[in-house]
Amino acid sequence: MTPSLPLLAAVSLVVGLLSAPVTGATATGRPPLDLTAPARAITAGSPASGAPDVAERSGAPDVAEHVPVHTAAERERVLGYWTPRRMAAALPLDPLAKVTGALRRLSARAGARLVVPARGPHSPSSGAPGGLALPSRTAGARWTGGGMVGRTTGRVFLTIGGSDFVCSASSVRSANRDLVVTAGHCVKDGAGAWADNWTFVPGYAQGRRPYGQYTARRMFVAGPWSRKGDDSHDIGMVAVGTSGGRHLGDVVGGQNIAFGTPRGRSTSGFGFPADTPYDGEHLVYCAGPLRDDPNGQTTGQGMRCDMTAGSSGGPWLAGFDASTGRGTIVSVSSFKYSDDRRTMYGPYFGGSARDLYVAAGRA
């Protein structure tokens, strides 16, 4: 088994609000996923009740759910926890997958910093301001074009095993107007613990929080990730609370999301890499075609990308429009193989991701 360094995947069905019907056929000729079908029961666990977190009932969606806070006072405590000093000191979460999964958990307990080496120069200002065309290929450049992607993409601050970490994430359109999509390992440590103090800061820029902070009220990961850290299902979705009485989607909007798209499409990935040569303070992007995992270890796809730890969970957008910053989320940054640190991989968004989205979007 090839060692990998976890840190996107294609779709013909664009999802807006859950109430919008989806029609048409996929590239495989099979009927499209029906996102209007009623969700079946999902077992909700909580630290207090000790109830199971994974839906084990026959026919139920394979989704694990967790309720991190229960009261307004607990939410205020989480917001107060993330002082500017703690945010600056949070380590970029760069978990190791598969055969090195134990090291991921060990490093979380020890607070170790896992560094991916720099790979050549990176442009500080090669975004797409002024409506210029986005380069069709880049391995890692600062995004300066603004637009929706600048508002909806942000940093996630979380605590696992007593240590503070940071990931990337995006606001996504949903029925509840409160949904954030990220990597599963930015929500739950595989078969280990759920994250504490989970907070999303959309539009983060050099310490600024222009659109507020949003704490987690309900967390969701795919069952295979929750049970065994399966990198093919390294997807997390979090329903957040309001900030200043306003829903996340009403403040920053949300990118579209899609499931079951054709493989190999050109995609643009965004995130906040925090290890050398990056500092986590700027939004960075990669762009290029996707390819299947050549090691056959996952069903995910990869793109050439030099982003480092901290970019985990950042959105991969198909059909990205550089002039508006809009696109369709088809995956998230997940992992790198240790013998190919210039390729980022992400899970394919198929039926499992769709079930996760339906459950989280109705939370």
Image: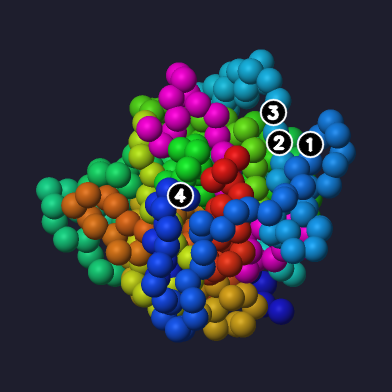
Q: Residue placed at 81% from the left, 34% from the top?
A: 47
Dot 1: few (<14), some (14–19), or many (≥20) neighbours within 10 Å? some
Q: Earlier in the sequence, mark 4 or mark 3?
A: 4
Query: What percent of the width, then of the height, locates residue 334?
Result: 56, 61
Mark positioned earlier in the residue sequence (4 or 1): 4
Quadrant containing the N terminus in the rendered view:
bottom right
Q: Earlier in the sequence, mark 3 or mark 1?
A: 1
For the C terminus, give its image quadrant: top right
Mark 4, residue position: 19
Q: Quadrant of residue 329?
A: bottom left
Q: Nearer the viewer, mark 4 or mark 3?
A: 4
Q: Earlier in the sequence, mark 4 or mark 2?
A: 4
The residues tagged by marks 2 and 1 sit, at their Cα atoms, a distance apart of 5 Å
**Quarter of the rendering containing residue 296:** bottom right
Residue named by callout 3: 69
Residue 341 located within the stretch drawn in magenta: no
Position above or below: 363 against 294: above
Identify the element where label 3 is drawn. Answer: loop
Extent of the magenta region: 222-250
**Mark 4 or mark 2: which is in front?**
4
Residue denoted by label 2: 67
Q: Examine the rendering and report whether any part of residue 39 can be seen.
A: yes
Q: Which residue is mark 1?
A: 46
SS at badge 1: loop
Determine the residue positioned at 62% across, 22% down. Answer: 75
Q: Is residue 224 magenta?
A: yes
The amino acid sitting under disc 2 is Val
Q: CA distance from mark 4 to mark 2?
A: 25 Å
